[in-house]
Amino acid sequence: MKLHRLGGLVVALAIVAVACGGDTENTGQAPPAGPETTAEVPPAVSTTSNQDLPTPAVGVLPDGPSALETMTDPAFPEPLVDPGDVLSGGPPPDGIPSIDDPVFVDVAGALELLEPQEAVVAVEIDGDARAYPAQVMIWHEIVNDVVGGVPVAITYCPLCNSAVTYERKVRGVETTFGTSGRLFASALVMYDRATESLWTHFDGRAVIGVLAGDRLEPIASPLMAWADFRSAFPDGRVLDPSATGFVRDYGRNPYVGYDDEENFPFLFRGPLDDRARAQQRVVGVALDSGARAYALDAVSGGEAKATNDVIGDEPFAIFWKAGQSTALEDDSIAGGRDVGSVGVFSPVVDGETLTFTVAGGDFVDAETSSTWTVAGEAIDGPLTGSRLERIAHLDTFWFAWATYQPGTELVEATG
């Protein structure tokens, strides 16, 4: 075993015991780690489209056995992944407890609640902007909430450094999501509490259980520095770490050293795309026309950087701004190296496609010379007050992107 793989395994086994345990009595004590798995069998990801299946009735969910209890019941539709590749990560279902009754405080009254560089998951729907601190998400992984009147599940997977939000409605029925205690390709596996089917974090698919084949509607939720969130959304709200209902060491990173390109992902089974190191940071963009990954150092640099690109006939712009620390490196959530904040947007405003550059640390479009923030709002110039349409993207590690978007183009830094 190569040394960097061994180092990653040691770190991962430690974090299972420390971070992945839950407690029904809110004592903060972790249960024993789950069984250790060492097999390295490639995952069998199904290419079943489910297009030939009958259209499910809206507002009706099927009855059937729980995929938390068995993943191989013959009553289930064909699974989209091999159940043998869905592994125990250590804790039981809900051992990492979701937050189902989140409490918020106004940003204006909580400017010093977090360090300016701390990462938050940013969600904005119909003017309702909310920040979910990484220092909380790293211990809970899922928050069930209602934002802008839309029921949502905000999800964060520390093992793959990714935040994804979904509308938590299945076939028109509202439900909530919890952690299953299992991993697929070293990534969070969720379950819905209506049918107890298993869902993958990255693409919002039900992969095992009575709902296998269903897909959740994604909602853009970028990781953003707290300073940038409070500047972009002064009337927003932030999840209160002191009112989660659980006792956790918020502010401390239980995954110390995990954000390291020399590491190997915990309990990852399957082939690795060797075009990049497994835990190299990438920005993943998936559009109707196709998908592409950008090495972080290809779209970052200096105080800020703008990247204009197109996939098929769909243009988009990537904004990167320095000032966000990685939550997965230092013992302190706020103490990691600066990896910056990323936003991906449609550059089309009033029918015109804008082209962006950076001047003096600000994003500026060449067509109107308006100045824009990393949150996609024009704050100076003819387009002041305009907002770019946000495109959902993934800040993640290469192994995770390559598993769910195999064979896509990788753009690396030049020079």
Image: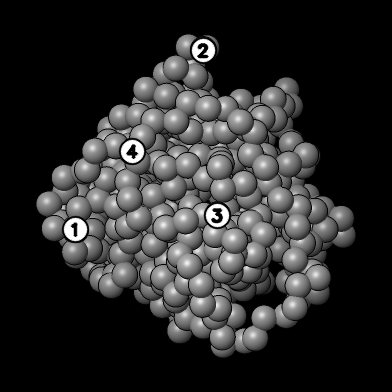
Residue located beneath label 3 in the image: 72
Numbered disc 1: secondary structure: loop
Residue located beneath label 4 in the image: 34
Q: Residues within 10 Å of mark 1 (few under 14, many from 20)?
A: few
Residue located beneath label 1 in the image: 24
- Name the N-terminal-most of marks 3 and 1: 1
Measure how far apart labels 1 and 2 are at the Cα level.
38 Å
Mark count = 4
Measure how far apart labels 1 and 4 are at the Cα level.
17 Å
Amino acid at the residue labelled 4: Gly
Q: Residue at x 74, y 36 (%)?
A: 411
Q: Are marks 4 and 3 in contact (CB under 8 Å)?
A: no
Amino acid at the residue labelled 1: Thr
Numbered disc 2: secondary structure: loop
Q: Position of residue 29 (x, y in %)?
A: 16, 45
Residue situated in front as seen by the camera: 360 or 178? 178
Residue located beneath label 2 in the image: 1
3 or 2: mark nearer the eye: 3
1 or 4: mark nearer the eye: 4
